[in-house]
Image: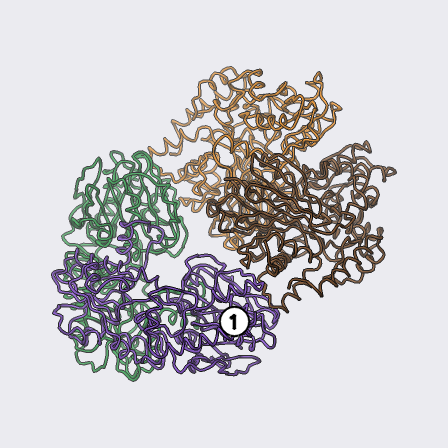
Chain colours: A brown, B orange, C purple, D green
């Protein structure tokens, strides 16, 4: 996952961009980067780690200009090197071009192979480099080249492009990932979440619409809708369940309020449970637990204390070490837990291993009963749109029954929220929400990947899937003819 | 402030000590250090920053042995250099001796001057070096030298001393700072808080008593009570209000539970306030706000979201920069706050500047009324026992009336908890608690400092103060005769 | 300038390559890098600074495999960032490909522009990336692609290419830059200079011939001559005058011996000078001065002592600071210099500013007469083949008369070696030596650059130049037809 | 060994001191430090490594004031940590006091033990801390305290003391280590060698005399001779043979000229050797070889090339690794050496292991005969005055016969210079020179050390030794009475 931000038409473009990255730090902590334009040249600085670590004191002085684009990166590929840190900057026929990309493409590998057979050379393993290559093979002004390039890719992309004189912001036609715009005086700000606008004291204007492209140049702003309409959108519900910051606002709804609503829905769906207290897994499960407590009337208690100082240095491989890692992060409060029947709330379960360790901690601290309550449905399928979920084999709910999961966790009961509850609490519908991780119904074809279980799930999907397959077939046809390679 | 820990009689003394420091990280983030004994030599490693930063990967391999003492340091003097980082290690007539000290002495400067006139040379500005000097001037076994030294100092000290073959743990006669002991199998563990025992999976045995000295040597443990009795004790109530970790247990009471009780007391004392919601200042005010919410029936809402990624690099001097610093740390949630009458809860107010900025954030986010509610009394006097409160002049409650503070904060009302409420909620009495920061009644003479307001307050103190003055006079007499200088 | 090395078919390929880089450190101190193949993947590590700094302790463990290629880089472009550090690694239709390149191309910019119009994107500003692009646009096996690519470029290149299973070493048809091969047991070693073989204890086998390509694969070695013959070669005489290490052997001749011969030739050409002692500018002028002393009978004296510890930190901009920089590096020995008539020997003069400062030092130390003697001809033209000479405008001998230079230096006389003397001392002829910096006669067309003075000089060149122009014209024709772009 | 420098009464005291350290870098490369006074406070900065590494860019801005003292440290104790880095700064009854010390005391351990029994605590293992302790135990003005302290110590010390308002420079009564003074305008400069004055453009005034103390205060300079006269002096001849920089001047003689004279003496003493060429071990043997070549008429050749880029990272333990380490540093020039009868010149032999490896290199490069010629006598005894020679057991000449050494080295012959030749070439006499490493006759008692072989040698010494023993006995008597402890 990644966070992106741009500031245009401001003398303070670079420091504003850097500051704004702190409000997007939760979207990526592996690397950070900023590219700036002084009107004729692009200069880029990238570094590993948190924003603070990536930009040592004084380093940002090397960047000047009134346009800047920033990126925080969550290494989905796992190789923690600088090569893939964004913004990526290349030179080509259109001159220098930088890209900061949030989301994942689902046909990048396929295009990359084709590009390679036609002479392209690649420096990174990032799907974003594919987009740059495609722009390089189209004549005409850079915005046309970007449009032509994006028409060939599928999947999730909220992108910021920077040339020496133009800033281009785009959101993919299904609008998987968020992208908002705002103003500080005359300056324009684009960012993944409203939190960055808030931090900078920028006025929120609106979200980019799915499929919208906004071009800022010479103090002016143009908006285009260059992509064919899909008849639906697919905003990632997992942003609301877990990923986004609680104070972010999407579609006029505050994320934290949606999370409390998820907890409240869950309380309604498990009204028969007899318990003494509600305990959240901090920090992610806190708003859900607040909603659950209010809807159920059960008191909310802090049964686990989170330690923010975690010894990365001391985390060693091995089972005992992983147990210690959980203890470093979460400390049980025995006086709260002892002899209690507990509803333990978390937002979701991925592999189940952490939940299992937490339940172990609670048992050893004297809990009498532990009812695990998850404020979202089981995750049954990997995300190909940017969330760093593991492969199907590692997703506990993709391969095991509810009862098997409960036994694995060591809980007295296990309840997941229903899909209907999920959509009701977050104000979404099947027509405007991507729930692929919970349903295996992917809104786009997944050209690059061939996981049998997936195809099956996809095949059983709703009409939208047929459309997606049609679109894919058409894309393939187009591919043969006029792909700019 | 500081955190201290020791592990004795374990092959893993060094890694256990290092790991335990993470559970004491909140007590000091400026520097960390570990000293280890292999039976004949002491080896020490200190570094600036968090434990993770102070000990780069692999660095701890340089330390070996079955005894280790660790320290996390909160720079009270403000000079962020390594010279004062503890444990301090010196060589003297007793051989090598290391000290890790939590607390502050109130007559160290006076003794230091006297030592200097008799030929002592000082390397650090730390009061802990004074203790080492005093031990060096006494013959006999090291434990006698430590006793003789500590009999000459006044103030707060929970100390861990290490020689190549002995570990000595001491708590001052008034017991200002905590110190607990426990076991992992045969190994002994001493630590500032029970959280470190929990983290290491150690069994809690008991707190050291005020004035107790415990010596671990050759696998055996001896306990002494070498100091004259004071007839009272003086555990720091601010540890409970703010400083200690919420899951720590002091005197059988969990800190978090005491904090909820402080909030509940406060709710009772301000029952006439008409409000819609209770909003905590995160993270410090959360348990107090939970207690307030329950006792008052007002709903608890998350109106401020804390960002854990803070850009130290980007914090610049100046008013605008400090406003930005608060925004980087705390983001208001407009949908929660808008048009609401808010009880804003925090544990305490020191200078008032941060509270003022937070109230400004809430106002701009649309709050209708803001009732500032502080779950402890006004801080009217500096701490000389280790808490890093500023001088009297900077303490807003030491120089301004309640109404003047309210105006400064920009709140619609301002309520502090009463002293009685404070003691009731935390289970303390005037006989066993230090409330000097709230009352200016210091349990010991403050030899080193001459702040007129203080002397006045002290002079007006209760009988305990007379005892303290008597003790001081006796100490001074002793000084003339047999001080080992 | 750069140094390159490869080791093939050795379990110790990576440590041998790293060690060998120390023997090539004089060829580039700005950055260093190593790429290794484990048979299926290439892994690369690059870092800024000297080899020691570029590869922090333990870092090379990340590289494994029995093939490795290393590079030391002398930043000719001046931008000290890692982006241009070699080996460069790209992925393309042939899979992963790495390049380490010594030398400069003279038509790279022109090709780059053309590639960009056909969709190529560039990550670096290095001419070496152009070669990779050209290989990517040719089908067939990688060695054919490399040949096809190199047929399109002009200028100087000694290159090492690495794929997961093949090592390819090439020297350009004119053989500007050195490249030698040797063996350690079964392992093959390629390196810029014999010094690297010596250091590794490798047996020297032979130099690669100009235009030769050697392929190591599966334990076997093939040699090709895939380029059209030029009828001449053009080994850089400046390698012998200054650049190479004194213990390197080129064409069976030890560099140091050639340098002594240059000094001896110079002594013969200035036999009329009356002087007391010969003083070298250390370290570069020492062998030349030894030769001069022997041939002239004048005693060699150490009048300048070199300090190897130079305070980069303290070198500030400004005239006074540059004077200090010279004094930091060179200290005059007053007792040697006082009242003496001195022949001051250096290998060459570029801008003249350092020589002027040294002469100032000698004057202030009491020298009576200073006769500057340069063991090579005046540098009148920039090098486009890899030596980091400045532009024509900064070359003092390109724009000023002999007498004007003497006055600028403040010398009593100034003598340069003749071209004939240069060739005689180094055993070269106009048919096998590049003397372009001394004669402005470039052995290849300089497509990328249009410096009027240069074209003129070139036009006045010998028949070889006509051939070069013919070759260029042919290349351009070919360009139109079958360039693989 | 160490280098020391001070600048007084200059606005640029700190940058001048830092720059001057580069001219003393050869005297110590393990750590560097600077202390400065702004008139009321001392501020100190120390760092590991070369001056460049110890003071990262910008770091010196933290130091201000018109007095500064600098130090480069050669770790004689081997523990490369910062604790012992000088200048050491302590606070005591006289206020803050800094010391920078070159040389070693011979009764420091004995005094330290005594101090410890009287209550002193030690932070470092340095003998310099003993001096500070002694000053702290004497009343009166600081210069009297320093005199009283130094009267109690024996051995070698050139010292610079700094208080907030005074600079004190002292040289021990025997003048083992150098110390010179000079001026830049009104500013005063003190330094270990004249090279530092040269570099700063300071005018050389004179050497401090043995036993002289110079005090700079309030723009004025006082000179005292506070120590009892010894009737002799003992300047270290090894400074001339090897340690000092070649361009340094001691007693009006340039070191490099003395070294050439040593070579010339050696040539005379081995006139019967038949050889073809003279080859120096670079860089230390070069001036000696030049003198030898001139006196003998044998041609000087560069048979070994020194590589200044040495891979500390890659030096591993083990025999093969040490051979590689020598090859990294020195490369043989086969074309020079092949079939030649060689006189190989070095300044001295300590353990003999490096010489042995070099002779091996020459043999493998084809040398016919190798005649090892050492331009100083055999080193038979350790230095207790600051030169980092190893213990007697490791000194090859202390335990083996000349013939055994020759066999160990693998040379065809081995010649050392005679003591008479040594003194003749360097212009010294037994009355003004310390030759203890060559003769085992120590000019002072060696109280701290009891090495049987030493006592024997010393006992067999000349009348000077009896004087030394008398002085020691007197010192011991004094010790009982009025030592200020």
B416 lies left or right of D158: right
**Quadrant, the C terminus of chain B:** top left
Residue D436 is at least partly visible in this image: no
Q: Chain of mark 1?
A: C
The total of numbered circles placed on residues is: 1
Q: Is residue B442 above or below residue D412?
A: above
Q: Is residue A393 above or below residue C175?
A: above
Secondary structure, mark 1, is: strand
Residues D20 and A468: in front is: A468
Where's residue C400, x and y in %? 24, 62
Where's residue A390, x and y in %? 72, 55
The quadrant in which residue A460 appears is bottom right
Where's residue D253, x and y in %? 15, 59
From this viewpoint, which residue is outermost toward the right? A272
Crowding at label 1, few (<14), some or many (≥20) Cα neighbours within 10 Å?
A: many
Where's residue D233, x and y in %? 17, 54
Residues C63 and A230: in front is: A230
Residue at the spot x=67%, y=46% of the render? A224
* Mark 1 lies on residue: C68
A434 lies left or right of D347: right
D291 lies left or right of A21: left
Residues A294 and D143: in front is: A294
Residue A300 is at least partly visible in this image: yes
The quadrant in which residue D334 appears is bottom left
Residues D263 and C62: in front is: C62
């Amino acid at each position: 996952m990644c966070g992106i931000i741009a500031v245009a038409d401001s003398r303070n473009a670079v420091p504003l961009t850097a500051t704004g990255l702190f409000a997007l730090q939760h979207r990526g902590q592996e690397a950070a980067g900023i590219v700036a334009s002084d009107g004729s040249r692009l200069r880029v600085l990238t570094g590993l780690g948190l924003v603070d670590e990536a930009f040592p004191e004084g380093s940002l002085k090397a960047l000047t200009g009134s346009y800047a684009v920033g990126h925080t990166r969550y290494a989905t590929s796992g190789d923690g090197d600088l090569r893939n840190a964004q913004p990526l900057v290349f030179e080509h026929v259109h001159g220098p071009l930088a890209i900061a990309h949030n989301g994942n493409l689902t046909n990048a590998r396929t295009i990359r192979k084709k590009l390679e057979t036609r002479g392209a050379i690649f420096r990174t393993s990032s799907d974003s480099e594919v987009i740059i290559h495609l722009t390089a093979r189209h004549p005409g002004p850079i915005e046309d080249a970007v449009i032509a390039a994006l028409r060939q890719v599928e999947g999730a992309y909220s992108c910021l492009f920077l040339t020496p004189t133009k800033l281009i912001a785009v959101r993919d036609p299904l609008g998987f990932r968020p992208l908002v715009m705002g103003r500080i005086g005359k300056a324009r700000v684009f960012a993944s979440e409203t939190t960055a606008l808030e931090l900078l004291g920028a006025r929120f204007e609106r979200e980019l619409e799915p499929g919208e492209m906004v071009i800022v140049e010479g103090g002016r702003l143009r908006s285009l809708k260059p992509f064919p309409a899909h008849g639906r959108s697919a905003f990632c519900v997992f942003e609301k369940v877990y990923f986004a910051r609680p104070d972010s606002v999407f579609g006029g709804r505050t994320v934290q309020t949606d999370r409390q609503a998820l907890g409240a829905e869950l309380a309604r769906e498990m009204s028969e449970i007899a318990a003494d207290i509600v305990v959240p897994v901090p920090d992610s499960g806190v708003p859900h637990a607040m909603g659950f407590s209010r809807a159920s009337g059960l008191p909310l208690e802090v049964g686990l204390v989170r330690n923010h100082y975690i010894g990365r240095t001391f985390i060693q491989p091995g089972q005992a070490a992983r147990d210690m890692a959980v203890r470093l992060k979460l400390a049980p409060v025995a006086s709260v837990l002892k002899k209690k029947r507990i509803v333990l709330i978390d937002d979701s379960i991925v592999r189940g291993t952490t939940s299992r360790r937490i339940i172990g901690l609670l048992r050893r601290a004297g809990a009498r009963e532990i009812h695990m309550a998850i404020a979202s449905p089981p995750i049954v399928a990997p995300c190909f749109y940017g969330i760093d979920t593991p492969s199907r084999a590692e997703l506990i709910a993709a391969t095991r029954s509810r009862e098997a999961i409960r036994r694995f966790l060591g809980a007295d009961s296990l309840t997941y929220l229903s899909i209907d509850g999920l959509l009701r609490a977050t104000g979404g519908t099947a027509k405007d929400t991507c729930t692929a991780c919970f349903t295996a119904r992917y809104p786009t074809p997944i050209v690059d990947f061939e996981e049998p279980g997936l195809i099956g799930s996809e095949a059983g999907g709703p009409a939208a899937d047929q459309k997606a397959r049609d679109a894919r077939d058409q894309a393939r046809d187009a591919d043969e003819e006029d792909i700019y390679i």
